[in-house]
Image (cartoon, coloured by chain):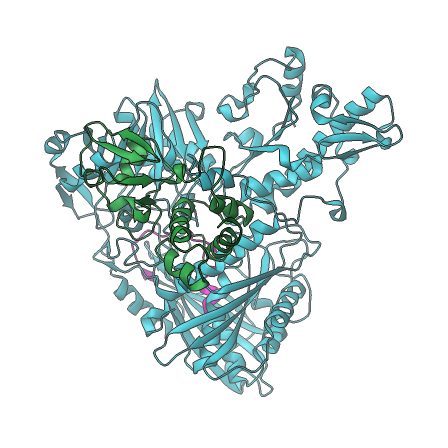
Amino acid sequence: MLTLKINGESRSLGDIDPDTPLLWALRDTLGLVGTKYGCGIAQCGSCTVHVDGKPSRACVMRVGQLQGREIITIEGLARDSDTLHPLQQAWIDQDVAQCGYCQAGQIMSAAALLNSKPDPTDQEIETAMSGNLCRCGTYPRIVKAIKNAAAGGA
Amino acid sequence: MDLDRRQFLLLTGFSGLAIGFPGLASGTEASIQVGQVAINHYVQIKTDGTIVIFAPNPEVGQGVRTSLPMIVAEELDADWDRVIVKSAAIDREKYGSQFAGGSTSVLRRWPELRKMGALARHMLLSAAAEQLKVPVTELTTARSRVLHAASGKTLSYADLAESAARQPLPDDSAMVFKQPGDYTLLGRRVANVDNRAIVTGAPLFGSDTRLPGMLYATYVKCPAIGGRPRSANLDEIKALPGVVDAFIIEGTNDIPLYDSVSDYVSSGVAIVARSNWQALKARQNLEVDWDLTTASRDNSADIRKQAARLAGQVGAKTLVEQGDVETAFAASDQVVESFYSTDFATHAPLEPQNCTAHFKDGAIEVWAPTQTPTATVAGLAKLLGLPGDKVTVHQIRGGGGFGRRLENDYARESALIAREVSAPVMLQWTREDDIAFDYFRPPGYNALKAALDDRGKLTAWQHHVIAVSDDGENANKSAGHRNSVFPRQRVEHFRLTSSLVPSQTPTGPMRAPVSNTYAFAEQSFIHELAVAAKRDHLEFLVEMLGKPEWLKPGSPRVIHTGRAINTIRQVAKNAGWGRNMPKGRALGLSFFFSHATPVAEIAEVSVDGDRKVTIHKVWVVADCGPVINLSGAEGQCQGSVIDGISTLARQSISIKAGRVEQSNFHQYPLLRIDQHPEIDVQFLRSDFAPTGMGEPALPPIAAAVCNAIYSATGHRIRHMPISSEGFSI
C-alpha cells in the first residue's frame, strides 16, 4: 500500500506500481484532473505541482519516490474549497485563459514564485515561468496577473 | 423557433415538472429541470432568477462559450451576472451544423442569436403587458426585469417566464433589435465564463472525462505514416499488469486523408488498461511487425528541393490570366522576382487528442473534444453502421484547437476500441502520437514576380503557387492558393499559375489555413517592391489597395479596401511609422485580409550581430465590425501574434521515409514567456456585421517581423522558420 500526502491529506494509492508518474496517479487513481498531461517529458509545465513547496513536473516524478513529501496540486492551492488563492483571483480578473489547459500549471509555477519572491521583477517572473508553455499565447496577461497578485495579495 | 414544441410544453403544463424535450433527447444538456421554463432552445429561465443560455458551438479557447451567449443576453436584456452558460446538445435540427472553424461562429450565428434573445424578450414583455394590463409600449427591460415607468412597477423575468412561454410568437416584422448605442454588454470586457473552473482545476476538458468503471487506451500506429501492423506480441501485452485487452484494428485506409465526416481509421494496435500509466507502460513492451508496403515514402527535404526547382519554371496550369503579363514585364522599368517557402508544421494543441466512448446495447455515446461535433456524429454512424440516433456526441472543451480538432480521427479510433470492450474507454494519445499523426500544415511555396513602371507603380503581378499533391491532380487539403480578389482586381496585368509536387503526408487546416503561409510571401514581397521602387512601404501598400470600396458589396469575405486602408493608417499612427530608429532596429509593416477581417500589424524589431532577433513590440489594428467581447477579441489577437511568431521562429516538421522526425516540444519548440513581445491591440469598430477573431490576426505577423528584419539588417528572409537561416528569437 502506497500512501502520499496530497493537499494536506493522507491519500492511499492502493497497490499502485511505484513507477507510476505522479501525474497519472493524481488523474486516474485520485481523480484530481486539474494537473494536466501535455508532454510527459517535463517540457511544457502543464503538470506542475508543488513538492515540498518547489514547483515540480508531476509527469516525471514517480510515486514510489514521493512518500513523506508534501504535495500540493491546483485543487489544494486555495486555503479551502470556497476561496481562491490570490493568483487564481488575479487570473480571473485579468481574464488570462483562452483554452485554459495550461493555466493550472502556470498558476502553480507562479504560486511557487510568489512564495519565494513576494514582489518579483518582470525578469524574475519570466525566468520562473519560462518552463510553462501556453499554446494560446496568454503570456502578456499571465505577467499582468502575477504582478497584480504580488501587489495585492502578498 | 419550434411551435410544436411550445405547444407540447403548453399541453403538458411544463412548470414545476421535469420534462425532456422530445427533440432534444440526444443530450441531457438541454432537458428541462424542475423550476425552469424554456422560452426557446437558447434560453431557459429558472425560478431562482438565473437564466440559462445555451452555447451552440464547441469551445477550444476561441471564447465562443462566452461571446455567443453574450449576443443572446444583450438582446434579452439578461442580467449577465446571473446567466449560466451551458453547451448545447448536438442537434442539427435545432442548432444547424455545430462546429468551430474558419472564425465563423460569430459571423454565422449573429442573426440567429440576436433573434433568439429578442424573441425571448418580446415574449416576456407581452407577458408583463398582460399581467400589468398596460400597453407593451409603456414597458422597458433591464437586467432580467421588466419595468413600467409610469407606475413604478417591476416584474422579474423569473416571475414572467411561465406566462411568457405561452405568448404567441411575433412576426419577424414585429421584432425589435437594440441599436449598438444601447448595448450594455456587447463591446465590453467580459470574463470567460469558465474562468473559475479553469483556475481551480475543475474537470472541464475532454481528457478530464471520468466515468464509473472506465478504462484507458493507447493506440499505436506505424511510425511511417500509412504502414500496417502485420502482427504484434499481443499475448505478452495482455499478460501485463492492468492490461484488459490488446488487439489489432484493421483500418479502413492506410494514409489518412482529411475528411471530418468520413469513416476513415488508420490501422494500429490498441492496448486497453485500467489506467493511463498501465496502458503506456505496456506500450513500452509492445513489439509490432510493420508492413511498410502501403506507407508514405515522403522526404520533406526532397519535396522542398522539387518545389524550388518548379518555382523557376512556368506553372503547369494557368488558373487566372488577366491583361498581358508578358508584355507588361517586357515594357516595365523593373521586374522583381522572389520565391518564398515554408516547411511542414504541426498544430500541437497543448491537450493531446483524446476521446471517451461507451458502446452499449447497439448505441454509442462519445465525449469528444472536437471542433466539429456534428461531423463526428455522421462519421461514427458511417463507421459503426448505426443510424444517427444511436450516436450521441457530447461537446466538451478542447485544450486548444487551431484546426487540429476539425478532424475526428481520434473519435473514430476511440469508437472502434470501445466496441471491443464492455466499459467506457478513453483513448488518450501521447504527445508523440499527436505530433507524428497530425494533418500537418502543408508547406507553402509561392513564386512571385512583379513589374514596376518608371514612377515605381505596380503594373503586373504573377503568382506561381506550388502545392503538395498526393494524386498529381489536386492540391492536398489546405495546400495551394486562396481565391482572392486582391491584388488581382487592383493590377491591370495578372497571372496565377499552379504546379504540384508529389507528397503523401496528410495535411489539413491550421489556424488561418493557406493565409498562414501565403501572407508571409505576399506581404514580404510587397515590401520588396516598395524597396525596389524606393518608396515608403505604407504608401506603396495603400496605393496598391487603391480606391476605398467594397470589392464585392455585401460579401463579408471579400476585401473592402477602405476598411483595409483604415487599419493600415491607424496602425501606422499607433506605432509611430516613420520615426527615427537606432541602427539595427526597425519597424516592419504588414497587412492581410482573411476570415472576413482586415488586420494591419507593425513589429518593432532589433537584430544583433549573431542574428538574434528581439521583437520589442507589436501593434495590431483590426476592423471586425462591432466587437462582441473586447477581452476575448484582444486575447485572440495577442494569441495569434504569439502563435505566428512561434511558427516563424523555429517550428519545422521534417519527414524522412514517411516518418516524422520530431517527437515532442524539445524538437518542436513553442514560444516561451520570456520571448513574447508587448502587443498593443486596437479595434476600429465599424458598422459592418461582426466577424470572428480566432484567426485573422495571425497571417500578417510573419511578414511584419521579416520586413522589420530586412529594414534593420538588409537581409531578406524568404523561408519560414527563420532558424533555417540562422536567426533566432
The foreground one among B152 and B15 is: B152
Q: Vertically, is B117 above or below B635?
A: above
Above or below — where is B693 with respect to B542?
above
Q: With B146 as the anchor, is B281 left or right in this view?
A: left
Most distant residue in the top direction: B12
Residue B552 drawn at (x, y percent): 65, 58
| Residue B417 appears in the rendering | no
Residue B397 placement, left or right of B39? left
Q: Which image quarter is the N terminus of chain B in? A: top right
Tell whether position A29 is magenta: no
The answer to which of B321 and B676 lies nearer the viewer is B676
Q: Which chain is green?
A: A
Specify whether residue B521 is painted magenta: yes
Choose top left, top right, bottom left or bottom right for residue B421.
top left
Q: Quadrant of residue B151?
A: top right
Locate the C terminus of chain B by quadrant: bottom left
- In the image, is residue B312 above or below residue B595? below
Q: On screen, B136 above or below B577?
A: above
Residue B717, image x and y in percent? 40, 74
Which segment did they paint magenta? B501-522
Q: Residue at x 43, y 35 (%)?
A: B202
Residue B510 image offset from top left, x and y in percent: 42, 53
Camera-nearest residue between B168 and B152? B152
**Chain B tint as drawn:** cyan
Q: Number of numbered discs present?
A: 0
- Residue B57 on image: x %, y %: 52, 38
- Residue A54 in sight: yes
In depth, the one of B346 and A60 nearer the eye is: A60
Task: Find residue B253 and report its image quarter.
Answer: top left
